[in-house]
Image (tube, helix red, strand yellow):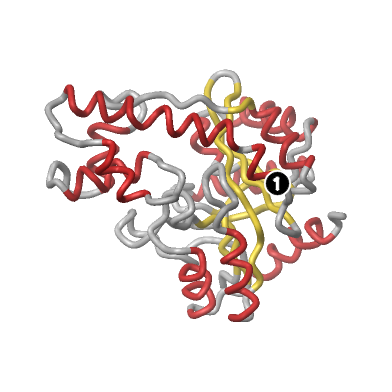
Amino acid sequence: MHICADLHVHTTASDGDMKPGELVSKAASIGLETVAITDHDTIKGVPEALSTGRESGIHVIAGVEISAEYEPGSMHILGYFKTLPDGLEQELQAVQMARLKRFPQIIEKLNALGYAITKDDVTSIAGDAQIGRPHIAKAMMQKGYVKDYETAFSTYLAKGKPAYVPKEKMHVHQALNLIRHHGGLPVLAHPFTLELEPYELKIAVEQLKSEGLKGIEVFYPEHTRSQKKLYAALARDLDLFMTGGTDYHGQGRGRTSIGDFGLDRETLHVMLDTFNQLQ
């Protein structure tokens, strides 16, 4: 499978390590034809990425990844837009504020565990980006408390671990409606994280489709072969297009590099056919 598109990458606008322009240039340098910028709960990095894409001759899709609540847990919804969606950033401010409220609570828990991490340690790393747990993990690494991101999350920051704090999210119905309101295509990201049995997943995806879901992420680093077959079958059965990407955040975040996962040209064109029907 020759990958020509990575439709799930993150930049310094949220919790990635590379600036939007740098990431697009990297995607172009390895021969990708299309890349989608999908930062968490923000599109601040998209204008720079679009500009670099025009200069580099690579198609850049404006995107976002929204953390959403649903019964009985949470899910991530990717939104893809034909043009930069005017007004979307303002409507994402509520979830952005939830991130700002959450990270000091995580710091307090780490302090109680004996780790001298301060809010300034984290904000100096994040800069103008949406503050997320990876920034806290990086602060822990800089102080020598953990050796890498994986250790920070698996020991302290992941759900169920001693420094975890749940984040206020918009409901999945709101996320779907928000993306559609701004002329975008909503896609279910990395469905394996829902931890549903196949029949439960089908019911959930059918419900999401009735509310406007257009695609499902099939090709993803942590999807097993059987999971990819299951999600591809769901896409066919429910007339959803398939997407894929690396969820790239930067070097040192796992073993995956940009372009390692994504879509071949044929699958990309199916997605773009739907994309091009947007007004």
Q: Quadrant of residue 59?
A: bottom right
Q: Secondary structure at mark 1?
A: strand
Q: Residue at x 33, y 54 (%)?
A: 254
Looking at the rendering, in which quadrant would you find the C terminus? bottom right
Q: Residue 192's x, y, as percent?
A: 51, 38
Q: Residue 242's x, y, as percent?
A: 67, 52
Q: Is residue 91 left or right of residue 147?
A: right
Q: Quadrant of residue 219?
A: bottom right
In the rendered image, the vertical position of residue 13 relative to residue 75, given as above or below? below
Disc 1 designates what residue?
Answer: 215
Q: Is residue 266 left or right of residue 29?
A: right
Q: Quadrant of residue 7?
A: bottom right
Q: Is residue 227 left or right of residue 240?
A: left
Q: Residue 179's x, y, as percent?
A: 72, 42
Looking at the rendering, in which quadrant would you find the N terminus? bottom right
Q: Residue 18's x, y, as percent?
A: 41, 63
Of 278 and 111, the residue lying toward us:
111
In the rendered image, the vertical position of residue 185 relative to residue 74, given as above or below? below
